[in-house]
Amino acid sequence: MQAQKISNTQTIPYAKASMAMDLGEISGDLAGIRMLGFREGHQYQHLVPYPEQAHAPVLEFVQEFATWFSVPEEQGFFIVGPSGVGKTTGVLHLLAEANVPTLKVGCHRDMTLLELIGNSQLKEKNGASVSEFVYGPLAQAFKYGFTIVLEEMNLMFPDVLAGINEIVRGQTLLVEQTGEVIRRHPAFRIIAAGNSFGNGDAGSGKMHGAKAQNAAFLNRWWKFSMGFLDVQQEYNILKDKTQKVPPEILRGIINVAESIRDRSIYRNPGDQNALDLEFGTRTTITWAQTIDRFARAGMGGSIKRALHATMLRAEPVEIQELLDQLCTNEFGADY
Ligand SMILES: Nc1ncnc2c1ncn2[C@@H]1O[C@H](COP(=O)(O)OP(=O)(O)OP(=O)(O)O)[C@@H](O)[C@H]1O
Ligand SMILES: [Mg+2]
């Protein structure tokens, strides 16, 4: 495949059958914001993520992401925020809108640069085992012009991150095992998501096992801090994802979640007494959907049991008591 020149000046909407990129308009509520994207029908269509059906756009995020994506210069995009607030959803939804071939990788503590760039693997050929080099996701993205999304990037060790940093800004990538020098495809983009910038930052207040990172590392990234969703948007998502849960219960779920968030480290960074409890949109959706499943099965006692099944059984007694109190205030004693 030949590298295509990216044009930052065209305003043609996505056209057919080409890997070329053009500026296109994002649809729906965000009409008017433009983002570089791929024309329909390219050969990596199978790598384009699916859009989120109930997507609630976060305006500042969309503006910054679209701006970075269209003209990334020598930066990656690093998004942090509490667990389950929609970092991955927001990123993948926009990549879907812009028809971008995407590779999503879950990072872990033992990850090496080799795992990302590639490895020799033994393959069976004509009855004999032969060693063959297989590109890892980072080398594939760099070579073919995909976007790579590194989830939980800050779990990785500094030397791996230093290697990634070279790739973020480099024009070439050396594959040490084979000696191949890969040229950077102009459409290559790199995105990282995590709970913290790893800098003792106010971005999230939470380190979550994240490794400390230095300023030289963070310099290479457009930094975005995502907070909890707007409550009306969150309500609309819950409404969209349930069938039989009355609106007042959906509102109650969000009120309880907001009470927890108000006490959390995310809204009280530096406060030693603040709660470290995951209560993002993922939790409210699961709680609402579990109530919905009880209702569809014709069973009662569902708000409490659904909350226990969603998260509470795994929490310490103090948290169980706090939530019991908040739910009693919200829904009444026999919720
Ligand atoms: N803006 C949004 N529009 C629609 N749904 C959303 C939005 N944000 C979050 N969700 C829903 O919440 C769930 C959790 O979001 P997501 O997985 O993107 O969170 P995250 O911030 O990446 O979490 P983690 O820190 O665990 O990686 C998603 O499955 C999605 O259904
Ligand atoms: Mg995520």
Image (cartoon, rainbow, N blue to C red):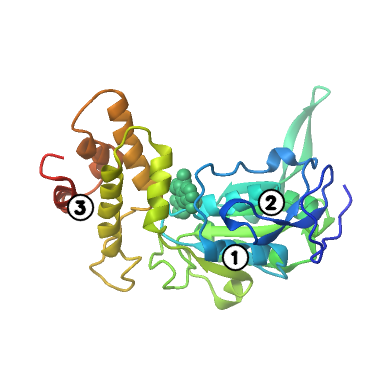
Among the 4 quarters of the image, the one containing residue 261: bottom left
Q: Is residue 94 visible?
A: yes
Q: Is ligand 1 closer than 8 angstroms to the Cβ of mark 2?
A: no
Q: Earlier in the sequence, mark 1 or mark 2?
A: 1
Among the 4 quarters of the image, the one containing residue 50: top right
Q: What distance separates the C-alpha of mark 1 from that of mark 3? A: 37 Å
Tell me the number on the disc at residue 319: 3
Discs 1/3, front: 1
Image position of 271 with respect to 311: above or below: below
CB atoms of marks 1 and 2 within 8 Å: no
Q: Residue 132's x, y, as percent?
A: 78, 39
Amino acid found under the numbered disc labelled 3: Ile
What residue sits right under mark 1 in the picture? Answer: 63
Query: Which residue is rendered at x = 66% and y = 66% of the image?
Result: 68
Q: Is residue 35 left or right of residue 42?
A: left
Disc 3 on helix, strand or loop? helix
Q: Residue 116's x, y, as percent?
A: 66, 51
What residue sits right under mark 2 in the picture? Answer: 98
